[in-house]
Amino acid sequence: MSLYDAWKNLSETHENQEAEIEFWKDYLNVERDIYRKILEEKTETVEGKVADLAAKYETSPEYFMGFIDGISESLKEDLDLDAIEADGEVSIKIDWEKLFYNMCAVEAEWLYTLPEWEGILSDETRKELHKKYKKSKTIVKEHKVGRNDPCPCGSGKKYKKCCGKNA
């Protein structure tokens, strides 16, 4: 079984809802600590054996695989998650702006509000990325011409007596 399959099995198989909540609470704390250390060190590229990196960030290889799974959409180069093994080498090249934007997209406030971001992205850039995310989620409703509104063709007639007849 690959490390990615082990992670998926670990994250999806729980005895009951309480066990699932406890698992995610534990994992999210580990994930926050990994991000905190990476941001503190301003490490743009994390390289090494998965098992060694897991030890460096004080977690299990399965949890570190979960971290890789989570950050995979914010990397400069794609990773084949199924091919990653505990004793295999991995190179994680982080795109900071993409990472921050994706943290906003998954509403991970505990991650995008970490004080360690200050040394990597300026306050202005972070606000701009957050604003960009919010704007991308805003739905703009197009103006619909009502039956009794003036016709948009400019004839001066009501829409229902002009272009609306054929609609």
Image (cartoon, grey):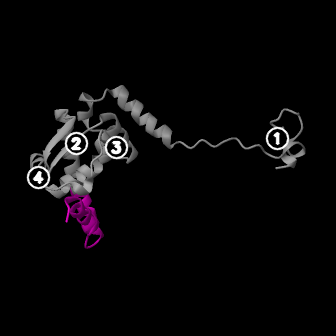
Of discs 4 and 1, which sits in the foreground? 4
Q: Give the range drawn in magenta.
A: 1-26
CA distance for labels 1 and 2? 58 Å
Q: In which quarter of the image is the N terminus?
A: bottom left
Q: Which of marks 1 and 2 is nearer the N terminus?
A: 2
Residue at which label 3 appears: 103
The part of the image, by quadrant, that contains residue 141 is top right
Image coords of residue 122 (percent x, y): 31, 26
Tag 3: Cα neighbours inside 10 Å, few (<14), some, or many (≥20)?
many
Of discs 2 and 3, which sits in the foreground? 2
Looking at the image, do the residues carrying marks 1 and 2 touch, with CB atoms under 8 Å apart? no
The part of the image, by quadrant, that contains residue 100 is top left
Q: Which of marks 2 and 3 is nearer the N terminus?
A: 2
Q: Which of marks 2 and 4 is nearer the N terminus?
A: 4
Circle 2: element type: strand
The part of the image, by quadrant, that contains residue 9 is bottom left
Residue at which label 2 appears: 92
Q: Which of marks 4 and 1 is nearer the N terminus?
A: 4
Residue at which label 4 appears: 51
Circle 1: element type: loop
Image coords of residue 67 (percent x, y): 23, 50
Which label belongs to residue 137? Answer: none
Left or right: where 27 falls relative to 86:
right
Q: Which of marks 3 and 4 is nearer the N terminus?
A: 4
Kind of residue at disc 4: Ala
Question: Eyeballing the image, is 45 above or below 6?
Answer: above
Residue at image location 26% in from the left, 54% down from the top: 81
Residue at which label 1 appears: 149
Kind of residue at disc 2: Ile
